[in-house]
Amino acid sequence: MTRFRPLSLVFAATAALPLAAVGDSAADDPPGVEVGTFRQQVATRWGADHGLPRAPVTAVAAGPGGELWVGAVGGLARLRGDRFEPVEGVGPVEALVALDAAIVAVADGALIRVDPRGRIERVATVPPSAGAVSGLAARDGALWLATDRGLYEVDGDGAVRRDAGLDGLLAGGVRIVRSVAVAPSGAIAVAARVGLFVREAGDPAWRRVLPRDGVRRWAPDDVRAVAWDARSRLAFASPQGVGIRDHDGAWRLFGVAEGAIPYADFTAATFAADRALWLGTRIGAIRFDGRSWEYRQGPRWLPDDRVGSIAPAGDDGDVVLATSTGVSRIALVPMTLAEKARRFEAAIDRRHRRTPYGFVGAARLRAPGDLTWWRNGDSDNDGLWTAMYGAGECFAYAATRDPAAKRRARAVFEALRFLGTVTQGGSHPAPSGFVARTILPTDGPDPNAGRLERDRRKREEEDALWKVIDPRWPTSADGRWFWKADTSSDELDGHFFFYARYHDLVAETPAEKREVADVVRAITDHLIANRFSLIDHDGKPTRWANYGPHLLNHDPDWWEERGLNSLSILSYLAIAAHVTGDARYRREADRLIDEHGYALNVLYPKAQSGPGSGNQSDDEMAFMGLYDLCVFETDPARRRMWSYAFHRYWLRERPERNPLFDFLYAGACREAEWRDAWGRLDLSPQGDWLEESVDTLRRYPLDRIDWPVKNSHRLDIVPLPPSARPGEERPVGSLRDGRVLPIDERFVEHWNHDPWRLDQGGRGQKLADGASFLLPYWLGRHHGFIRD
């Protein structure tokens, strides 16, 4: 038998890190980020079922009192409560604008004024020679119309005249004006087919604008939209890019070729009250706050993707957007991370608990987006997801001492413990220590129906190692429950991760701690007694929960799982030794390390080909296991090795903007270092990981419906190289800086999701829970990375 040299001889000894530096105590954590109140973007959408006029919707405006007005082919309507009321006597609307306390619309070949009481006044007739009206602007009683025959001005007497001064600059007789905007100063800007034109306040002459930014100068063509803000900043949008002129005349130019702008088929532009620039496109909307470009696409944000009109709404930075089939208001709601956590915890208690044990998971909706009816169902990973939710509640209790968090954590302990007791006895009893994946009540449909045939087909067509077991759902001893067999390694990872947190952070009495020790001992003893495999009711190992060296080191079918499963079993043994105080679990770990090279296996937890090439389910498991190895390892040399393995893994995951991964690594390794004959390597987290993690938690959407999200058409995306995903048929990629898209431009149910996939989501009929927010948030609070 090959015997591996002890790590203390392989690596130069250094002083051990204090346990508090990597353990579950937050006492010595460095100061974190004071998050405070931020603006959470929340969308409210309206469609035909809310009383909107017949589509397509053509224009939207918000009155000075906050009233929302919508123009469409079917007429004009105003929002009253949660429904739109039609304004009688108004035909198809081409454009809208707020003017003083009223709304002005272009409808039926005329300009009409509608006062707050709904009274209609005809202001002027739009001459047929103007053609189609694409935009409307107002200032101090005057009105301007952008048309496909030029710019028309309406004076106070109702006369409508084409601006002859601009006509001379519209080259080649192409008079198409797409957008017009008026500044507080009185300056007027026009987006035309042939360029950008401005008439400054007090100057009767129009000039074509050729903006300069440093050494760059543009001659914008095919300009689609213009806008002024309250400080007379000017913005334009064209297929070449976006330009913003500050009030002092300095330009900032953002070219499409530079890779910052998500999409450039522009249709509209406006500045919100918070000075952010909003741009409408034929596929979604864009918000630019001066630092970052945010893309708003899909039903999470919009009724449909074609945005034709945008208007500011109120003083907080809200906007309303008209799409072909409806209207959306994107509000910037003041919020704290703690308030967001309370919302998600309340939503889980209301919609996401299944069975009296409260297993946490997604809910199914009857119709897309309809939260009035939902149904809870099982999943293969009920134990894992419930355990990760429970770990978050353990961290919450440690951070706040809130009795509600302790009650939730205790409920999760009982649920997970029951997954171990339900397998004992009954129709097909499993060996002691075996935990079920999940449970279903026996008074419902039999989940075994047709399952055996499906399992056989899967083994023949997809996975030659797939376990065919009958029944896959045995019944419990009391006859009340089906329990699901073939439990996987990720389930055990979740169980052990939770039990360690519950033991150290929540269990306070000796009796409570003994309860945890008994459960952990039963599972761990089962694995040790069965050559480190989880043995099912048929007396054979499950498909994935195999950790023995006879497989991981000597069976080619298992070499791909060698690193991850070596890591998992060592973390289980470390936790078992910690919560039971029994030294034999450390002796078992010593044997795997010294005789079978498991420490070297852990150095390479997963075969990958760079960022974007990994399996995120494996990554999630690895990060929980590495955290526990670093937390509970008592040997300094081994802890350095685990920290080094963790460091290498974390660097590969850095582009994924994952706060769970960042906080697990930082919580375990914030003072770690590596020393050898060649010098010292600081293993503590470096860079903007903390700011990025907090940004992900801020952006994490309140809307947890699995709306479809499409990003593969974007201009700011770089595809992953084929070497990262050999044979991948779905579009995968990142932003040009190598990082994945922000979380509010993707759909994330759990942290095992693939953040590199550009087109994601479902049909809007799954309501995910918020546990994937709660775990990293409370983990960050516990370790002091977040002060909220």
Image: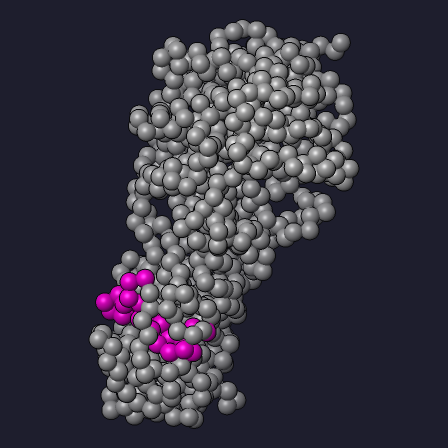
Q: Is residue 104 above or below residue 432?
A: below
Q: In this view, does 592 lie to the left or right of 158?
A: right
Is 714 colored magenta in this rendering? no
Q: On screen, 565 above or below 274?
A: above
Quadrant of res 34: top left
Expressed as whole percent of the image width and height from the top left, the position of residue 633 reads 52, 15
Residues in magenta, as a range = 56-82
Task: Locate the N terminus by quadrant.
Answer: top right
Q: Does the magenta stretch include residue 69?
A: yes
Pick the front one: 95 or 456: 456
Percent position (x, y) of residue 432? Answer: 59, 14
Q: Which residue shows up at 48% across the image and 8% down it? A: 581
Give coordinates of residue 662: x percent, y percent.
Answer: 48, 34
Q: Which residue sits at x=51%, y=76%?
A: 221
Q: Which of 226 and 435 is in front in this view?
A: 435
> Which image quarter holds the C terminus?
top left
**On screen, 678 above or below 211?**
above
- Based on the displayed image, in which of its 4 quarters is residue 552 positioned? top right
Is 448 left or right of 555, judged from the image as shown? left
In this orientation, which residue lies closer to the viewer: 732 or 176? 732
